[in-house]
């Protein structure tokens, strides 16, 4: 049984199908990039993964668990913008990652001190300890996204969803963020779904690249059919995973 | 250089800012001189000296009958009504605005009612309020509440709806309950808007207060103005009007400072 299973997923708005027959199995620890043209349903798919909306048909399950009916701690998310809380300091944003699930949404006394210590450790890790007491509005776009990722991870989600997380950043910052995310994954294995417009980014970061497109097309009525996963690339080893096959299994060389 | 690109320097700016006040004052003084030259007993535009003397008398001399300084008594009575009315309106509109902004059920049931109720002219309800609540304090406070609450509810609920959906979803993925989303995400971001809504409503609040006091009261700033109107005591009326303007200005300024102090994240930026 795979970690995340998507079975026969359909989603339509006002009877217009957006997604149809989406099936997917993802193993724990995999990084899945999702690419496709605008309006091909990849953001819809992410919202379904997030349980922000419910599919018309089919189900998404994590470890064969129940279907989620609303967003929860299982599924962390980082959006392109507005992912952090502007009225909290950088450190309080991280603390919120733990504190929001308590009945009052805040820690007091000893638990607050412990949570702050953990938050400081996270800030150290994501390189934001020097701005811990600042408000997010004073941070650059890249720093805000690093904070958003740190905040999402503080809640220890089972899967992390990234909705064009680096879309609003300049190219240099974007490359720094790629390195940051790669390092973070090397330290803490996590299952990630990332929607992106940037094919190169998808292949660079992902273990798999899913392409969403419409397999059926009615020229008289372009909205008649929905999109589904049309390609599922293995993106490890720079997208050419069998290049090193003979080095990995020298016994095969004999057959040459 | 284009006119839209010409910016006055700081001293010129201050001078320009003072200009309208100087113009009003000059127009008054000239008008007053002309009328007083024609008729020294004229009451319509008393000389500035007369107004100043009256103001000093009003602020310092006790009433011969009651032994109290009426102006301070009036100010206290009016401010109590104003603060009570605006305070109740702020609490009501904050709870209703948050409910409408966050809960789809509340939005469906309240939005239409608020939109219609905000169209009712509050002053037209004043006779009903006097009949229902009597001529005492309650009817005046209720008039202020009825007058400004619908506008504030619409303003605040819109502000809650303006909070990006991403933030609300993000809070949920951190495990926040509806209450935590309301208390930790929506409320702190709406409070500054509440203060500015109060600032915007204060003008109408004063209007409703003075209207209610003019119709039926035995103390209060509006009551006094409409009382001395019968004697054409322009010096007293002018003193009261300037005093009310000053009070309104100071309250507005204090709220602005409070907003800057209490919400440092608002002004934060690169």
Image (tube, coloured by chain):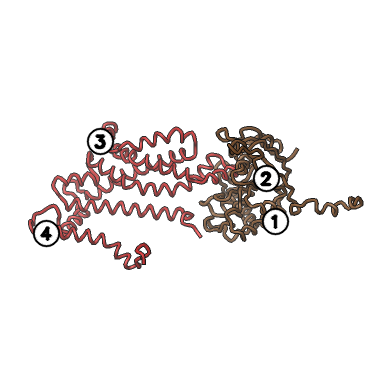
Chain colours: A brown, B red
Where does the image place residue B40, in percent across and percent down from the top left?
8, 57
Q: Is disc 3 placed on a helix, strand or loop?
A: loop
> In the rendering, which numbered label is found on residue B34?
4
What's the CA distance linking mark 2 and mark 3?
Answer: 73 Å
Where does the image place residue B170, in percent across and percent down from the top left?
57, 45
Q: Residue at x 35, y 52 (%)?
A: B252
> In the rendering, which numbered label is found on residue A121?
none
Nearest to the observer: residue B49 or residue B114: B114
What's the CA distance linking mark 3 and mark 1?
Answer: 73 Å
Q: In front of the other: label 2 or label 4?
A: 2
Q: Is disc 1 placed on a helix, strand or loop?
A: helix
Where does the image place residue B51, in percent across and percent down from the top left?
18, 56
> How many residues crowd mark 3 within 10 Å: few (<14), some (14–19), many (20+)?
some
> In the rendering, which numbered label is found on residue A183?
1
Image marks 4 and 1: residues in contact by CB distance under 8 Å: no
Whichever of labels 2 and 1 marks the residue nearer the N terminus, that label is 1
A227 left or right, relative to A238: left
Q: In front of the other: label 2 or label 3?
A: 2
> In the rendering, which numbered label is found on residue A211?
2
- Report the residue marked by disc 3: B135
Quick check: can you spot residue B102? yes
Can you say whether B37 is above or below A242 in the image?
below
Quarter of the image that includes the N terminus of chain B = bottom left
Quick check: can you spot residue A101? no
Image marks 3 and 4: residues in contact by CB distance under 8 Å: no
What's the CA distance linking mark 4 and mark 1?
Answer: 85 Å
Q: Chain of mark 2?
A: A
């Amino acid at each position: 049984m795979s970690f995340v299973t998507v079975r026969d997923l359909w989603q339509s708005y006002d009877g217009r199908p957006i997604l149809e027959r989406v099936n997917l199995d993802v193993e724990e620890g995999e990084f899945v990039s999702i690419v496709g043209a605008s309006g091909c349903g990849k953001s819809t798919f992410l919202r379904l993964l997030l349980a922000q909306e419910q599919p018309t048909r089919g189900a998404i399950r994590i470890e064969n668990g129940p279907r989620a009916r609303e967003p929860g701690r299982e599924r962390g998310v980082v959006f392109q913008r507005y992912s952090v809380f502007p009225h909290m300091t950088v450190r309080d944003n991280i603390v919120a990652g733990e504190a929001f699930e308590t009945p009052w949404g805040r820690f007091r006394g000893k638990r607050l001190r412990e949570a702050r210590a953990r938050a400081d450790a996270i800030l150290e890790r994501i390189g934001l300890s020097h701005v811990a007491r600042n408000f997010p509005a004073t941070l650059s776009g890249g720093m805000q996204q690093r904070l958003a990722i740190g905040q999402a991870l503080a809640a220890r989600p089972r899967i992390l969803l990234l909705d064009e997380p680096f879309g609003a950043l300049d190219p240099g910052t974007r490359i720094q963020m790629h390195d940051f995310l790669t390092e973070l994954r090397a330290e803490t294995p996590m299952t990630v779904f990332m929607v992106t417009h940037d094919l190169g980014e998808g292949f660079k970061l992902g273990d798999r690249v899913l392409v969403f497109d419409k397999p059926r097309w009615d020229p008289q009525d372009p909205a008649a059919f929905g999109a589904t996963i049309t390609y599922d690339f293995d993106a490890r080893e720079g997208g050419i995973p069998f290049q090193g096959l003979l080095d990995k299994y020298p016994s095969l060389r004999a057959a040459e | 250089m284009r006119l839209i690109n010409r910016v006055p320097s700081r001293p010129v700016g201050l001078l320009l800012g003072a200009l309208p006040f100087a113009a009003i004052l000059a127009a008054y003084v000239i008008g007053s001189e002309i009328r007083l030259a024609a008729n020294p007993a004229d009451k319509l535009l008393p000389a500035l000296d007369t107004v100043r003397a009256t103001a000093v008398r009003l602020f310092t001399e006790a009433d011969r009958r009651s032994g109290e300084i009426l102006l301070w008594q009036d100010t206290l009575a009016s401010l109590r009504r104003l603060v009570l009315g605006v305070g109740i309106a702020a609490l009501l509109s904050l709870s209703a605005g948050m409910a409408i902004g966050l809960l789809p059920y509340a939005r469906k049931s309240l939005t239409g009612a608020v939109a219609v109720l905000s169209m009712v002219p509050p002053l037209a309800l004043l006779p009903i309020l006097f009949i229902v609540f009597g001529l005492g304090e309650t009817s005046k406070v209720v008039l202020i509440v009825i007058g400004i609450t619908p506008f504030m509810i619409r303003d605040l609920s819109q502000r809650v709806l303006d909070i990006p959906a991403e933030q609300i979803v993000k809070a949920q993925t951190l495990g926040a309950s509806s209450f935590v989303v309301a208390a930790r995400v929506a409320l702190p971001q709406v409070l500054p808007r509440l203060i500015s809504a109060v600032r915007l409503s204060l003008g109408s609040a004063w209007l409703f207060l003075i209207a209610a006091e003019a119709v039926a009261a035995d103390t209060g700033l509006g009551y006094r103005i409409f009382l001395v109107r019968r004697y054409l005591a322009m010096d007293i009326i002018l003193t009261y009007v300037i005093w009310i303007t000053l009070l309104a200005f100071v309250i507005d300024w204090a709220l602005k400072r409070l907003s800057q102090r209490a919400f440092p994240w608002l002004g934060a930026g690169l």
